[in-house]
Image (cartoon, rainbow, N blue to C red):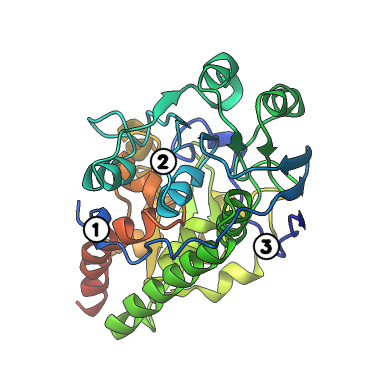
Amino acid sequence: MHHTLRSAARSSRLLAPILAGALLLGACSGSDTDFAAGAPSGEFEPTSIDHALGTAEITAEPERIVTLGMGSAETVIALGEVPVGIEEYPWGSNETGYLPWIHEELTERSEDLPTQFTGGTEVNLEAIAALEPDLILAPWSGITQDQYDVLSGIAPTVAYPELPWTITWQEQIETIGTAMGKHDEALDLVSGIEQRFADTAADHPEYRDVTFSYIYNTGPATLGVFLRDEQRVAMVRGLGLTVDPVVDTLEETEGTDSAVIGLENAHLLNGSDLLFTFYSDPANRQQIESQEVYQRIPAVERGTLVAPEDQPFVTGSSMINPLTVPWAIDRYIPLVDEAVAKLGS
């Protein structure tokens, strides 16, 4: 069987300028998720997956999986396996040293935690080789051709379809399922996530007519807006809120799934009932929120700005996969309820 990764009409991308910070990134434990893997598909069928950096030839059912980038470890776990190694994310991890939704899920299942290694531009290739993987999954990552050439010599490696950090969440899950010989179960995971979003929106009809924009900054006088299919925005849309129509009029900054509009165009956000954002650290927050133009944005002025400071939550709500969705939704609802209540007042 041969699979070619599809090009997405609107891909989910990371912003390079803040990749090293917030973008790089307790309610729902593993037993509470709606996304249990389905029944085994049967005997493993060898598969070939084309991607931007080469072709992964997977001839036997993988038993030792390593994941790179964001979101892939979670899908592997949701499909019933535990990676032997995963890229570490100190920024989004809690006191356990792991991303909390991963730690909670595996603890609930009484599974051993995977080994963590340095990733990103300094990916620890020796540590990966020492894990003796038979499959390396990096469909939402920024691995380079040189890194891939080494990794593919260790084990079949699946990279991104066309551009670094560019893949839809649905395609990421389906790609991982295909590589693991669990394509149908992966489709069930996608359906489960979509159903969870639909159920959440149905439970909160008061959100339906509330508009929002999801913004970010890269320092003073800067302002960017994530477009509607960027994963952070898609997570909020999944709660039942409506993207401010102005977002669809903005021109994408190439390769970012966002529009850099500059603080001088902050008036474009005047129609957004709620604004969602994050800051790289408390100093960055103070710096940005002290700007007079920023203060005059209606949502900021009336306090309908949703800007969580908890780094794991910022990370978990920035990506859509079977473990983060229930975890993030349970934490988002109280914050959104508080903001929506201020609209009424």
The amino acid on which the numbered mark 1 sits, given as a three-letter code, is Ser
Q: Residue at x 61, y 39 (%)?
A: 138
Under tag 3, what secondary structure?
loop
Tell whether 211 sits left or right of 307.
Answer: right
Q: Across the whole image, how many numbered discs are drawn on residues?
A: 3
Under tag 1, what secondary structure?
helix
Q: Badge 1: few (under 14), some or many (20 or more) residues near its Cα, within 10 Å? A: few
Q: Which residue in the structure is indicated by mark 1? A: 31
Q: Residue at x 23, y 42 (%)?
A: 110
Q: Nearer the viewer, residue 288 or 187?
A: 187
Query: Looking at this rendering, what residue extends furthest in the front direction?
Result: 43
The amino acid on which the numbered mark 3 sits, given as a three-letter code, is Arg
Q: Residue at x 59, y 45 (%)?
A: 61
Placement of the N terminus among the 4 image quadrants: bottom right
x and y percentages locating residue 194 in the rendered image: 46, 72
Instruction: Confirm or deny contact between disc 2 and disc 3 (CB under 8 A).
Output: no
Placement of the C terminus among the 4 image quadrants: bottom left
Q: Which residue in the structure is indicated by mark 2? A: 82
Tell whether 20 sits left or right of 275.
Answer: right
Query: What is the spatial separation of the Cα atoms under label 3 and label 1, in whole angstroms?
Result: 33 Å
The amino acid on which the numbered mark 2 sits, given as a three-letter code, is Val
